[in-house]
Amino acid sequence: MQLQQAISRILGGIEAVLPKGVAKDLKANIEAVIRSNLEGLDFVTAEQLAVQKRVVDRAVRRIRELEKRVKELEAVDEEKKPKKSSRSTAGRSKKTP
């Protein structure tokens, strides 16, 4: 129904600026063009958009929480890894062939 209202508003505006005889003749053609172009678009209501925004916002918050948790777990993992000792080669004699 919203599509029909939008088309009616557009046609009303067009009729207002065109001469009466021309507007009547072109009205059906203009309506067909407008309808075919608007029907190809995927409109959503403001309510649907608000719902999707909340879903995305919640997903972003959850992703940030998970990224933080991953960093914490990586830090714990690094602490648990045995530290490699650097062995010095000083004092070792080279073997000569």
Image: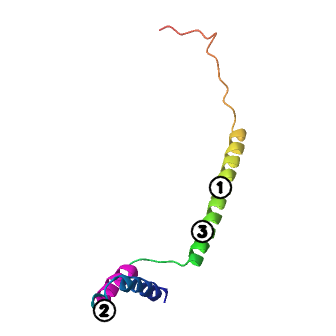
The residue that mark 1 highlights is 64
In the picture, the disc for residue 41 is: none
Amino acid type for the residue under numbered disc 1 = Arg
Mark 1 element type: helix
Residues 5 and 11: in front is: 11
Q: Earlier in the sequence, mark 2 or mark 1?
A: 2
Residues 43 and 72: in front is: 43
Write down the region rendered in magenta.
26-39
Residue 44 position in % (x across, y down): 51, 77
> Would you call the spot at circle 1 few (<14 residues within 10 Å), some (14-19), or many (20 or more)?
few
Identify the residue at the far front of this view: 19
Residue 6 position in % (x across, y down): 45, 84
State left or right for residue 88 relative to residue 39: right
Q: Are marks 1 and 3 in contact (CB under 8 Å)?
A: no
State left or right for residue 45 relative to residue 30: right
Query: Magenta region's main secondary structure?
Result: helix
**Distance (Cα) linking label 2 and label 1:** 58 Å
The residue that mark 2 highlights is 24
> Would you call the spot at circle 2 few (<14 residues within 10 Å), some (14-19), or many (20 or more)?
few
Q: Is residue 49 above or below residue 15?
A: above
Q: Residue 25's image quarter?
A: bottom left
The residue that mark 3 highlights is 53
Q: Is residue 88 above or below residue 83?
A: above
Amino acid type for the residue under numbered disc 3 = Lys
Residues 23 and 35: in front is: 23
